[in-house]
Amino acid sequence: MHPSPLTSQPDTQTTDHVDVLIVGAGISGIGAAYHLKTKLPGKTFTVLEARDAIGGTWDLFRYPGIRSDSDLHTFAYEFKPWTSDNAIADADEILDYLRETVAENDLGRHIRFATKVLGADWSSADARWTVRVQDAATGATRELTCGVLFSAAGYYDYAGGYRPQFEGEEDFAGQIIHPQQWPEDLDYTGKRVVVIGSGATAVTLIPAMADKAGHMTMLQRSPSYVMTLPAKDPIANGLRRVLPDETAYRLTRRMNIARQRFIYDLSRKRPQLVRTLIRALNKKQLPEGYAVDVHFKPRYNPWDERLCAVRDGDLFKAIRAGKASIVTDRITRFTEKGILLESGTELEADIIVTATGLNLLAFGGMELTLDGAPVDLGDEVAYKSMMLSGIPNFAFAIGYTNSSWTLKVDLVCDHLCRMLAHMDRHGYDTVVPVLDDPGLERRPLLDFHAGYVQRAVDRFPKQGSHGPWTLEMSYARDRDRLRKGPVEDPALHFASTAAAARGRTPVAA
Ligand SMILES: Cc1cc2nc3c(=O)[nH]c(=O)nc-3n(C[C@H](O)[C@H](O)[C@H](O)COP(=O)(O)OP(=O)(O)OC[C@H]3O[C@@H](n4cnc5c(N)ncnc54)[C@H](O)[C@@H]3O)c2cc1C
């Protein structure tokens, strides 16, 4: 048995060196911490979180109605059953679930809040990362070291959402709000609210505000696909009544993964059929004579961009009740009273919400260097969608965009733990994916056509056309690759660098 070069002794939370450093305490980072703690109990690890709370996305966004659009039977962790009656859950319920996960597994003592990771330098001689962090309160920076760096920093910029500038904004007499910075005390009772956007945020906000607001208008340049999902899943809740929670959860999860896959595959293979089906479902939920093809007929095929889910058809109910309407038009300029449209109509508003999206950001904005030399992340290729070509001892959590994000993250964490155990068994301290395939075609890592993806795609690593360099958007294929497949791979190079270097270095007296 080899010694374990990646396992330092002893495990103490005051040390400034850990075996694994996790960046981010969102659902991915907490999941990674759980996997490490339970599968590799000898490893030391710390989770660094830039904010002062866990939960990431689910704590950051505070707009009315903030909720998942995935069902929680696939969005929740594989290792902890989702036992609420609600399959589509509010942020508060998701946060409670995450807090419970932390408490049940004593993960809290591993998390350091208000600590932003600015960058990390890999030392080949020492086989470790020196990580530069900043204290959010004081701005002071310091360094810590780790054997493996794991980015669970999400995919967008926490500093602010995407906010195009509109002509005449300064003339508007009302309030302009971005959903990523929702004012806690916003009173919209009786107000006319125009929401610019047609994505997940807009379709969530509109029905959530409709009862209190004077009127809600969704102003979209072009329509998105909108599907109704039931808030409560009768099959899941039925199974839970007759079976133990774990069994009911396992069955529901399996069924829902298969259903998501079926809808996705059908959308890719028979887009016209899916378009027709969605249109028929939309029409049924809209008032008689409603202009379905003006407001609900996208220019692209289903799943070229993420489908928008509405809980129990609430958006359609608000439209039927006359509390909300949709306008499909282009903005000419903001005016004192609202928004002037290209059609010549002026939409009057007291509040304008710019649900115009996110600013994508790779790996929480961390700057990586290798022995002092900067790395351009846009040049690297993702290995098994969890590591990067040429970057040693670095892994990341990027989930699915055509299914629940977290399904993939569970598999990535599984594979990482197996890889670390493999390294310990063989006495390796370094692992690096090596891209040595001149025939490999490079493609964007994120293959959505949505504007917010296209704006940033160059700054993200690439994926390859074949082999371990492809990014799979399929849970079944990833399960075979990451959970069942071998850790060893011709493209993955293991070494015992630091041990060898130490052997050559005379011991100081
Ligand atoms: C409004 C909204 C709704 C969504 N709904 C769904 C859904 O229903 N289903 C789905 O599958 N996906 C959904 N997504 C995508 C969603 O973000 C992910 O599914 C999931 O929450 C991501 O979790 P995460 O832990 O990977 O990242 P995040 O939730 O983004 O968490 C990342 C954490 O890392 C921290 N961090 C970032 N950079 C640094 C740094 N440099 N140093 C230290 N800490 C750092 C952040 O502060 C944050 O706490 C939604 C996204 C949004 C914005």
Image: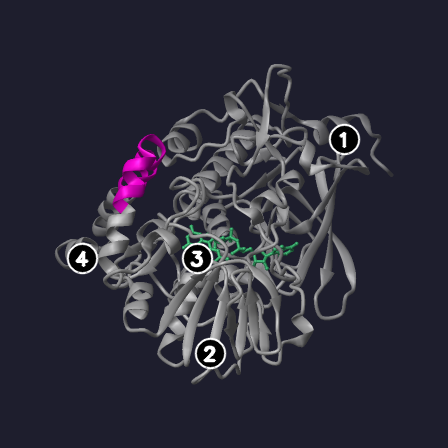
Asked if ligand 1 lies within 8 A of label 4, the reply is no
Distance from mark 3 CB to nearest ligand 1 atom below 8 Å = yes
> Whole-percent x and y of residue 93?
37, 67
Whole-Å distance between the Cαs marked 2 and 3?
21 Å
* Residue that appears at 64% across and 63% down: 166
Identify which amino acid the numbered label 3 is placed on. Answer: Ala
What residue do we see at 49% from left, 51% from top?
Answer: 28
As measured in the structure, the alpha-carbon distance from the residue carrying label 4 to the one carrying label 1 is: 61 Å
Q: Closer to us: mark 2 or mark 4?
A: 2
The first of marks 4 and 1 along the sequence is 4
**Which residue is labeled 3 in the image?**
200
The reply to whether the C-beta atoms of the residues labelled 4 and 1 are less than 8 Å apart is: no
On the rendered image, what quadrant is the N terminus found in? top right
Q: Earlier in the sequence, mark 3 or mark 4?
A: 3
Label 3, secondary structure: give it: helix
Q: Which residue is mark 4?
A: 234
Q: Of discs 3 and 1, which sits in the foreground?
A: 3
**Spatial separation of the CA atoms under disc 3 and disc 1:** 54 Å
Rounded to the nearest whole Å, what is the CA distance between mark 3 and mark 4?
24 Å
Residue 118, position as x, y percentages in the image = 72, 53
Q: Does residue 420 appear in the picture of this structure?
A: yes
Q: Give the mark count.
A: 4
Return the residue at label 2: 192
Instruction: Give the residues drawn in magenta, as a range.
Output: 257-277
- Kindly identify the amino acid type of the residue bearing the numbered disc 1: Arg
Report helix, strand or loop for mark 2: strand
Q: Amino acid at mark 4?
A: Pro
Which residue reaches farthest front? 344
